[in-house]
Amino acid sequence: MSTLLEVTNLKKHFPLKDSKLFSREKPVLKAVDGISFSIQSGETLGLVGESGCGKSTAGRSILKLINPTEGDIYFKGENISHYRGEKLRKLRKDMQLIFQDPYASLNPRKTIAQTITEPMKIFQLSKEEQYKKLERLLDVVGLRSYHKDRYPHEFSGGQRQRIGIARSLALDPELVICDEPVSALDVSIQAQVINLMEDLQEEFNLTYIFIAHDLSVVHHISDRVAVMYLGEIVEIAEANELYQDPKHPYTQALLSAVPEANPHLEKQRIILKGDLPSPANPPSGCKFHTRCPFAEEICRQEKPELKQVSSNGQMAACHFVREVVS
Ligand code: SF4
Ligand code: MG
């Protein structure tokens, strides 16, 4: 396997209107605040955290739908952080997004054929090629050929997400960022769509970043999982390792809320204190200290680094998890 994507110290800060007239620093909302990770070709990385933790912003920054404030993004070894114009347009073929809301992301006035072939038209595929691809994509996502002349309102939520997935594959991307692709669907439909996405990954050799707020959703599909809190990655590990032996107190709390995450663990629900603080004014030191059941003085003062905490490469950012050097 080769590294498809590498992200180093990625930040996306949004300027806020100045509230304190004399404050020296310009106020910013630190949606993504220095994340680093890499993904191997064919791998699925789950990106998990509460809403507002910056995971969607991270996904959009990687796709360059919004410009990162700082940091580098390497795609197949090329630094794409400063791509603009034609280079960026070409790159869009290789990286696609699947949206959360299949209702909102499909144009109600376009037929399914028009929707799926739209990206192919933009990249000037021949009519014949468009037709061939359309038929194949309908088939692989489990729709029928006669569906192509229908409109989005004639389909169920699960079918609409299949249409969205077909469109995202229209240009043979390598990386697909899936932003909560099943959150808007009924639980009974979620598993079908996730299974479909796994089949498509095999068939088209796709690499996924799978964004979700719920750890139970990403368990099945992810090879590795990164947990985000207030714009930072607090833990990243092989999926099984993370679920069986979470090291960071925040991951432990998230997992304790998942009913059958791990039946072997004696589980006690860890209730987090208070609400998620604002990313415009994050807590000092460890950003999690205002809600962490184990916080001590050092947590308020010093920011813990993300460090290796098991011989398998599991990493966590907590002062009280012992570093393991493999
Ligand atoms: Fe909790 Fe302190 Fe660890 Fe942060 S560094 S997770 S506050 S124990
Ligand atoms: Mg989101």
Image (cartoon, grey):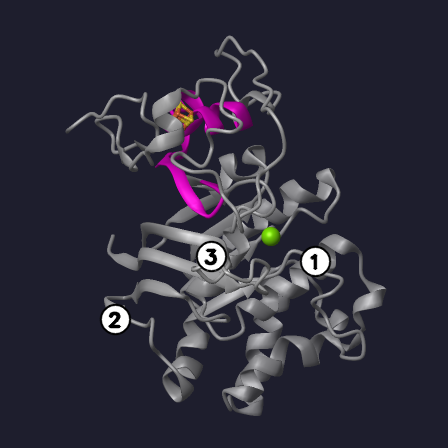
Q: Residues within 10 Å of mark 2 (few under 14, many from 20)?
A: few
Q: Which mark is residue 236?
A: none
- Would you name the residue on which mark 3 appears? 58
Q: Is residue 30 visible?
A: yes
* Residue 196 screen position, x and y as percent: 58, 50
Label 3 near ligand 2 (CB < 8 Å): no
Instruction: Specify whether residue 251 is painted magenta.
Output: yes
Pointer 2 or 3: first along the chain? 3
- Would you name the residue on which mark 2 appears? 78
- Would you name the residue on which mark 1 appears? 101
What are the residue bounds of the magenta stretch?
228-254
Q: Residues within 10 Å of mark 3 (few under 14, many from 20)?
A: many
* Residue 98 screen position, x and y as percent: 58, 61
Disc 1 marks which amino acid? Asp
Question: Seen in the image, is 225 located left or right of residue 170?
Answer: left
Q: Alpha carbon of mark 2 to alpha carbon of mark 3: how far?
A: 19 Å
Label 2 near ligand 2 (CB < 8 Å): no
The residue that appears at 21% across and 27% down in the rendered structure is 311
